[in-house]
Amino acid sequence: MKLFYRLLSVILACLSWMPAWAGDVNVLRLTSLDWPPYVSKSLPGEGISSSVVKAAAQLAGWHTEIRYFPWSRAVQEGLNNAEYAGYFPAFYLKDREKSCYFSHPIGNSMVGFASLKEKKFDWQTLADLKPFLIGTVHGYANGEAFDLLVRQQAITTDSAPSDISNLRKLLAHRVDAIVIDKYVLRQLLITENSLPANKSEVVFHPKELTNFSMHICFQRNDKGQALQKTFDTALEKVNVKKLESLYFLQVLQEQKHTH
């Protein structure tokens, strides 16, 4: 974990416009959920999204504090409790603009299909999915077009309670492919040591099913709007892709040290 913070410090030091810290450091207090690899207390930098938020906040002269809740409570507390500035990572939805001020994107959640190499799974249109049994996670939204075809039973799915359960079904040849976030899959394949040896055969199809931009949802008041503007200005100087790469480099190195 020390390497991650050292590399992050180097990136920040290279940004020549970084302001001096004020005597009394402002605190950007946000709510979130435990969602590896994006946000989690146990991860380097508290996860990919947290690292991006912290980098931008530091450039704005803020110290970041993240409080963890189940998602529905994280949203409620982040939007309505004056103790917090907002919540993250929030997918951009037009309707949500009525309840908060969205920051510029702090990353993306690319959702697609994972399969085993031997299956030679391929698709270009949703109609191509009809011959396959697709593993999904109960309650997850996977794009309006896909979800509609599932409801119409034009696509055959098998639901699991979590991403790790879904992945285990794939490795056990119980489904042909699974719907999963690209980075969630990468995190599980690196860190979940209980997975069988054939996890090395898992491939992620290059064609995305859907792609959600992720943001901080600042409270919809004057303070929230001011924070959004300051944060967005700082975020423009943060290399999000660089931080994502550094994160997975650190995770891989930590796994090597544990074996």
Image (cartoon, grey):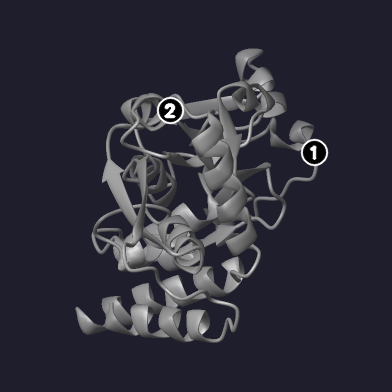
Which residue is labeled 2 in the image? 79
Res. 178 in view: no
Res. 71 in view: yes
Amino acid type, mark 2? Leu
* Left or right of 204 in this view: 129: right
Which residue is labeled 1 in the image? 125
Horizontal and vertical percent position of residue 134: 55, 35
Q: Quadrant of residue 145?
A: top right
Q: CA distance from mark 1 to mark 2?
A: 38 Å
**Quadrant for the N terminus in the image:** bottom left
The residue closer to the viewer here, 180 or 195, is 180
Q: Which mark is residue 69?
A: none
Q: Residues within 10 Å of mark 2 (few under 14, many from 20)?
A: many
Q: Residues within 10 Å of mark 1 (few under 14, many from 20)?
A: few
Horizontal and vertical percent position of residue 107: 58, 55
* Left or right of 93 in this view: 169: left
